[in-house]
Image (tube, rainbow, N blue to C red):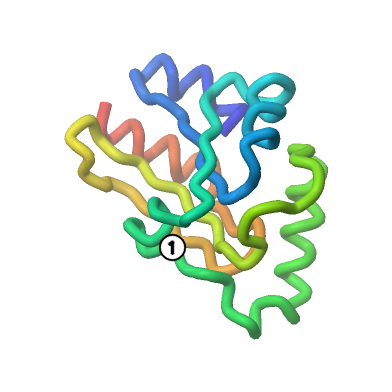
Amino acid sequence: MREAQPELTASGAKILAVGTGAPFQAEHLMATEYDFECLVDPDRNLYRALGVEHIAFNQWFRISTWRKYLRSRGQAEQGRITGDPLQAPGVAVIDTDGVVLYLHRGITLADYPTVDEVLAAVREIA
């Protein structure tokens, strides 16, 4: 979302990253990588509310899983893995009333929608 931040901000959207890691990682990312808020949800409350599950056991053995993971590692340096390494990723677009208007539930490591998909969802709201 870093590269889409100017357009998202111009449309009135706010980016918020949430992870299961440690607070020091969120602080590091905000200080060095991202110009938006990063929060920590170690109890996975938001993930459960959105129905974003753990990565299925069989996904760990897929070549595409590791290819996506290795590609994403070069984009942000979070440091050592903390939190829940089995947690699948997700991306949500939520309006100001708390209604989820777009939701991508990842099934494997680094399984994110394209930036264009997220921008299209935000444009529909704006």
Residue at (33% x, 31% y) in the render: 123
Q: Quadrant where the C terminus lies?
A: top left
Q: Position of residue 67 (x, y in %)?
A: 78, 63
Residue 105: x percent and y percent?
A: 45, 61
* Residue 16 on image: x %, y %: 47, 32
Q: Quadrant of residue 117?
A: top left
Q: In the displayed image of the protein, which residue is found farthest to the top?
A: 10
Q: Nearer the viewer, residue 113 or 88?
A: 88
Q: Position of residue 85 (x, y in %)?
A: 66, 62
Outermost left residue: 97
Residue hosting label 1:
52
Q: Is residue 10 above or below residue 52?
A: above
Q: In which quadrant will I find the N terminus?
A: top right
Task: Report the residue at 57% width, 50% height from top.
Answer: 20
Residue positioned 39% across, 51% down in the render: 46
Image quadrant in which you'd find residue 34? top right
Image height of 56 relative to 122, above or below: below
* Element marked by disc 1: loop
> Observer-nearest residue: 95 or 121?
95
- The residue under the point 64% across, 54% down is 83
Q: Looking at the picture, does residue 38 appear above or below residue 80?
A: above
Amino acid type at image mark 1: Val
Left or right of 36, for residue 104:
left
Specify the farthest residue to the bottom: 58
Q: Nearer the viewer, residue 72 or 4?
A: 72
Quarter of the image holding residue 14? top left
